[in-house]
Image (spheres, rainbow, N blue to C red):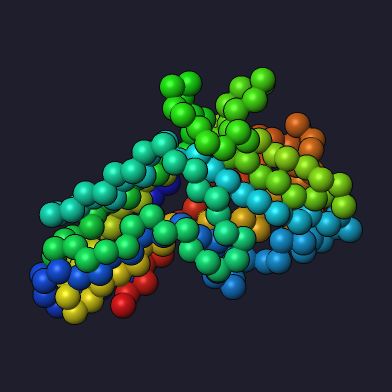
Amino acid sequence: MIAAGGCDTTQSRTDQPGQLRVVMQIDTNPVSVAPFNAAVSDDILILEEVKMFVEEFELEGENFELEIENFVVDLPLNETPFVLFDQQIPGAKLEELELEIDKPDDDVNLQDPDFRDENGSYSIIVKGTFNGNPFVFRSQKEFEFEFEWEPPISISEDEGATVVVAIDLSKWFLQEDGTNLDPRDESHASKINSNIKKSFRTVINWH
């Protein structure tokens, strides 16, 4: 499990209905995000498509619960958010977000054929090029995240919020020294999966 930290959760002024938006997107923090083709070595890694199968997404707290199951996130490779929820809700205090990215169960009807083939099922699919050669990285690992806010995030008529699940793709295929991991090399899969697990955080944007 990964616990969130460092979020600004200033309390809102009333308990009236307010706008709540929940999105997933690339982490745009300039401190942590580098261009996808930047590396210390001469290797050039370019990401062209990133998809994940979300088995469960749950956001809950006082007077509110959002639960979505078994859906594919085709993550935009720019600052565009992938919107999960966007509407007014009664005054609520958000306390916890849980996210499970996993291989789809056999009984799940998938519209995207990339998540199953003759070798099994996959939780994350990444397509791109490495030194000009196309690759497809497939992860079979289960990723579980739990983010908690103390004090809770209060949504009101005066102060709505966007809950962002921010994902730092720039580190997925990097070694600690800044050199690229070849996604075609199966011996790199464990390190890549470890990088993926460390790349998720939450950001609260007030509006």
The residue shown at (76%, 56%) is: 46
Q: Position of residue 72 (x, y in %)?
A: 49, 43
Quadrant where the N terminus is found in the figure: top left
Quadrant where the C terminus is found in the figure: bottom left
The residue shown at (10%, 70%) is: 15
Q: Position of residue 40 (x, y in %)?
A: 81, 61
- 85 or 160: nearer the viewer: 85
Residue 72 as seen in the image, left or right of residue 44: left
Q: Position of residue 138 (x, y in %)?
A: 66, 35
Residue 181 as seen in the image, left or right of residue 172: right
Residue 12 as seen in the image, left or right of residue 22: left
- 139 or 201: nearer the viewer: 139
- 33 or 107: nearer the viewer: 107
* Residue 102 versus residue 47 in the image, above or below: above
* Residue 202 versus residue 100 in the image, above or below: below
The residue shown at (71%, 54%) is: 47
* Residue 116 versus residue 152 in the image, above or below: above
Q: How many marks?
A: 0
Q: Is residue 120 visible?
A: yes
Q: Is residue 1 visible?
A: no
- 148 or 184: nearer the viewer: 184
The residue shown at (25%, 69%) is: 19
Q: Position of residue 152 (x, y in %)?
A: 22, 61
In the image, farthest residue toward the left: 15
